[in-house]
Image: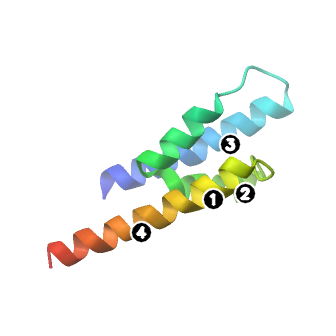
Amino acid sequence: MIYAFVVNIFSFLLFGIDKLKAKKDLWRLPEWVLLFVSLIGGSLGALVGMWLFRHKTKHLKFIILVPLFFILHLILIYYFIQQYR
């Protein structure tokens, strides 16, 4: 639970930081970093960051992959809950 909380806060902050850097025309985070953090458990934070900051919402790979990662994470959570019930 702590891991999920931390990685999602981290993911959310990365999207916010990258959006701020985009507005100021500064060096940006590579897209693979944002997607990787989403993949390793930060998909909810990424989705909220995409929506709140309106960041990467026109990039097809983000529109497809981040929700797909979120669904995958929900399935994994359901699976583990069923296993340890």
Name the residue beneath numbered marker 2. Answer: 52
* Viewer-side residue, 76 vs 7: 76
Are the residues tagged 2 and 3 within 8 Å (C-beta)? yes
In three-dimensional space, the C-alpha distance between marks 4 and 3, rounded to whole angstroms, equals 24 Å
* Tag 2 and tag 4, C-beta contact below 8 Å: no
Instruction: Say whether marks 4 and 3 touch (CB < 8 Å).
Output: no
Quarter of the image for the C terminus: give it: bottom left
What residue appears at the point 41 percent right and 62 percent down from the top-left corner?
73
Give the mark, 4 or 1, whose residue is nearer the N terminus.
1
Determine whether, in the image, residue 71 is placed left or right of residue 81: right
Please indicate whether residue 62 sits to the left or right of residue 5 in the image. right
Give the Cα separation between the discs numbered 2 and 3. Answer: 9 Å
Q: Which element is circle 3 on?
A: helix
Q: Residues within 10 Å of mark 2 (few under 14, many from 20)?
A: few
Identify the residue shown where x is 54% and y is 61%.
Answer: 68
Whether pointer 3 and pointer 1 mark residues with C-beta atoms closer than 8 Å, the reply is no
Q: Earlier in the sequence, mark 2 or mark 3?
A: 3
Give the distance between the C-alpha atoms of the residues marked 4 and 1, in whole angstroms.
16 Å
- Could you give the CA–CA distance between mark 2 and mark 1, rounded to whole angstroms? 6 Å
Rendering colour mode: rainbow
Q: Which residue is mark 3?
A: 16
- From the viewer's perspective, is the residue at label 4 or at label 3 nearer? 4
Q: What's under tag 3, amino acid-wise?
A: Gly
Q: Residue at x 85, y 24 (%)?
A: 25
Contact (Cβ within 8 Å) of mark 2 with mark 1: yes
- Spot occupied by residue 41 in the image (x, y as percentages of width and height): 42, 51
Q: Quick check: 62 left or right of 71?
A: right
Mark 4 highlights which residue? 74
Res. 72 image quadrant: bottom left
Q: Could you tell which of marks 3 and 1 lies nearer the N-terminus?
A: 3
Q: Where's residue 17, x and y in %?
A: 67, 36
* Mark 1, residue position: 48
